[in-house]
Image (cartoon, rainbow, N blue to C red):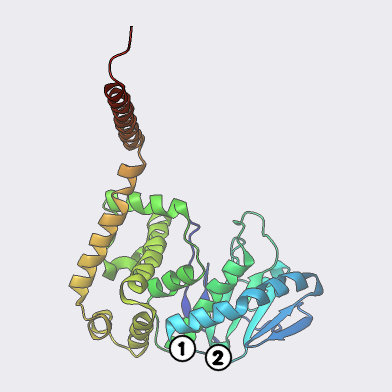
Amino acid sequence: MPQTKRSINRPAAAWLVLVITLCGGEPGTRAAFGDATVETTHAPFVFRYVEADRPLVQALEGIADRAWARVTADLGHTPPAPITVVLAHTDHAFNQFQPPDRPLPAWASGVAYPEVMTMVIRSYHAPGSPRQDAGTIFVHELTHLVLGARFGNQPAPRWLHEGVAMYEAGEWRPQHEWALVRAVLGRGVPPLDELTRFLGRTEADAATAYLLSEALIGHMIATYGRPAFADFVARLAEGNTFEDALISVFGVSESRFEARWRAHLDRRYTWIPLITSTSALWVVMMAVAFVAYAVKRRRNRKIVGAWEEEERKEGPPTE
């Protein structure tokens, strides 16, 4: 199962709405960039870091342009520059915007602050946390920033925030397929209007809801295209309801959209156990063996027929 992540919008000290990937909290009044002493500009990004993290910055620069182009296109919005990326090399640096009594959890890997277009990423592995690629974290947090800027003071649906961030960061893994198989077969897929509520329930429910959110975004983009999805996001950011956005952009009601979505889940995730089970494997092997036998038998008939024809032409053997 994937690690449970949380993205929360909260009002803060007059100038900041906090969108946190793994845990929420209001920003504190610590120094803006903690121990980061080096600054590198790779428009529209400004990286702040300690010298030891320069190789990591160079790696992030290698993916930054593509990530920026894709995320802004998919969400139909290009926030004003700069986008500040702080690489935190200590717990203190990672929590620099947090009040002393509300530190981020040890297993958190990144945090995004949309109103000031700033993200903070751990440049080290915190004990007890899953190892994650810094590039994946970067794209995930960038998506939160762009989406947060796109909605401004209008709250974005939580399933949209997390689903888009996971989709853009390419966080889908083979084991996620099986998690959704269990959810679909076990009737654990909540209605769309309850998906956000499931994100705040038990760890198991939340994990399933995150995967469903990502799968839902992928389904929308695959079905209607990226430009239409960007228009859909724009409608929501303008304050339209989910159903109004569906009708105006995709031309489908919420009930019809959900019916199609559930049909998609059934088609995709109820066949996986059938085609990957041990019994199914034996059936496939038997079918392959039968075809091979039929081909071999046909070839043997042709060979025998050729011999008989040759003997007929040569006539009976002489004594």
Q: Earlier in the sequence, mark 2 or mark 1?
A: 2
Q: Against 122, is 65 above or below?
A: below
The quadrant in which residue 109 appears is bottom right
Mark yes or no: residue 248 visible: yes
Residue most extreme to the front:
318
Residue most extreme to the top:
319
Count neighbours of disc 2 (C-alpha within 10 A) and say few if under 14, some if 14 to 19, many if 20 or more: few
Mark yes or no: residue 100 visible: no
Q: Nearer the viewer, residue 260 or 26?
A: 260
- Residue depicted at 67% across the width and 59% down the height: 126
x, y percentage for residue 172? 47, 60
x, y percentage for residue 180? 36, 54
Number of on-image labels: 2
Q: CA distance from mark 2 to mark 1?
A: 21 Å
x, y percentage for residue 309? 28, 26
Which-is-in-front pick, marks 2 and 1?
A: 1
Give SS at disc 1. loop
Give the label on residue 77, or none: 1
Count neighbours of disc 1 (C-alpha within 10 A) and say few if under 14, some if 14 to 19, many if 20 or more: some
Give the label on residue 15, or none: 2
x, y percentage for residue 202? 40, 57
The quadrant in which residue 201 appears is bottom left
Q: Amino acid at mark 1?
A: His
The quadrant in which residue 86 appears is bottom right
For the residues bearing labels 2 and 1, Cβ distance under 8 angstroms: no
Give SS at disc 2. loop
- Residue depicted at 47% across the width and 68% down the height: 166
Q: Against 315, is 133 above or below?
A: below
Residue 58 shown left or right of residue 232 in the figure = right
Residue 226 shown left or right of residue 84 in the figure = left
Residue most extreme to the bottom:
80
Q: Amino acid at mark 2?
A: Trp
